[in-house]
């Protein structure tokens, strides 16, 4: 089962994708914790996934320019105990990112870096994409990589001790 690309509730899309990743990585019968995470960019209810090509990256950056969008990470934690029970915990991390106005020169420069490849929303804020952003409101790690605080809140104390 592949990833969902759209849905009525973007947060649920991110959680479902995280669950699919975690379930796909789980080993039957193993006593383990398996983490799945999926990050999407949302503006006006539209999910901006990983642009397939430079043209789509330009379109995405044009849409995000001068606006505030949300970075949503669905997190799924599957905890498999010794008696084969599986506990499933999920959460959504939300971070608001405000982009500066993106003119054609800035957009084309950024697309030329190819940093957008394989990135939800077509940018990497921890790299050259930092030039696109004006402000981050929320958990910065959610935009850069994994939402660490959200993951720590899901993980039960004492599991695996």
Image (cartoon, rainbow, N blue to C red):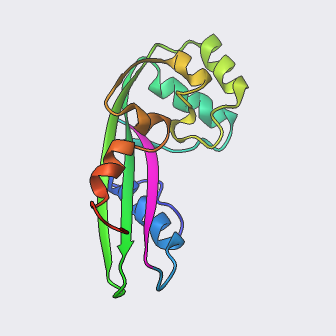
Quadrant in which the C terminus appears: bottom left
Query: Residue 146 at x, y = what percent?
Result: 45, 44
Q: Is residue 61 above or below residue 33?
A: above
**Nearer the observer, 47 or 14:** 14
Give the magenta range: 31-42
The residue depicted at 41 percent of the width and 65 percent of the height is 19
**Residue name at image x 46 percent, y 52 percent:** 38
Residue 3 in view here:
yes
The total of numbered circles placed on residues is 0
Residue 114, quarter of the rendered image:
top right
Q: Left or right: 101 with respect to 97?
A: right
Depth check, front residue: 83 or 20: 83
| SS assignment for the magenta stretch, majority | strand
* Viewer-closest of 111 and 97: 97
Compared with residue 35, is residue 125 higher up or lower down, i.e. above or below? Answer: above
The quadrant in which residue 79 appears is bottom left
Displayed quadrant of residue 53:
top right
Q: Is residue 34 located in the magenta-colored stretch of the structure?
A: yes
Q: Residue furthest front?
A: 161
Residue 82 horizontal/vertical position (percent): 37, 84
Residue 140 lies, in percent from the top left, at: 40, 31
Q: Relative to 86, does residue 96 appear above or below in the rendering?
A: above
Q: Which residue is drawn at 37% across and 52% down?
A: 74
Please name the residue shown 64% across and 22% down the image: 110
Residue 57 inside the magenta-drawn segment = no
Q: Is residue 153 above or below residue 101?
A: below
- Residue 45 visible from this viewpoint: no
50 relative position to 9: left or right: right
């Amino acid at each position: 089962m592949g990833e969902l690309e759209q849905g009525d509730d973007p947060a649920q899309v991110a959680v479902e994708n995280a669950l699919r990743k975690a379930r796909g990585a789980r080993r039957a019968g193993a006593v383990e914790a398996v983490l799945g995470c999926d990050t999407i960019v949302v503006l006006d209810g539209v999910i901006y996934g990983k642009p397939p090509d430079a043209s789509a990256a330009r379109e995405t950056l044009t849409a995000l320019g001068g606006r505030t969008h949300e970075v949503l990470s669905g997190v799924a934690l599957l905890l498999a105990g010794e008696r084969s029970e599986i506990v499933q915990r999920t959460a959504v991390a939300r971070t608001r990112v405000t982009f500066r106005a993106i003119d054609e020169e800035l957009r084309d420069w950024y697309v030329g870096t190819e940093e957008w490849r394989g990135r939800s929303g077509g940018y990497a804020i921890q790299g050259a994409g930092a030039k696109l952003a004006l402000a981050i409101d929320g958990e910065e790690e959610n935009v850069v990589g994994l939402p660490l605080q959200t993951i720590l809140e899901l993980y039960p104390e004492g599991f695996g001790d």
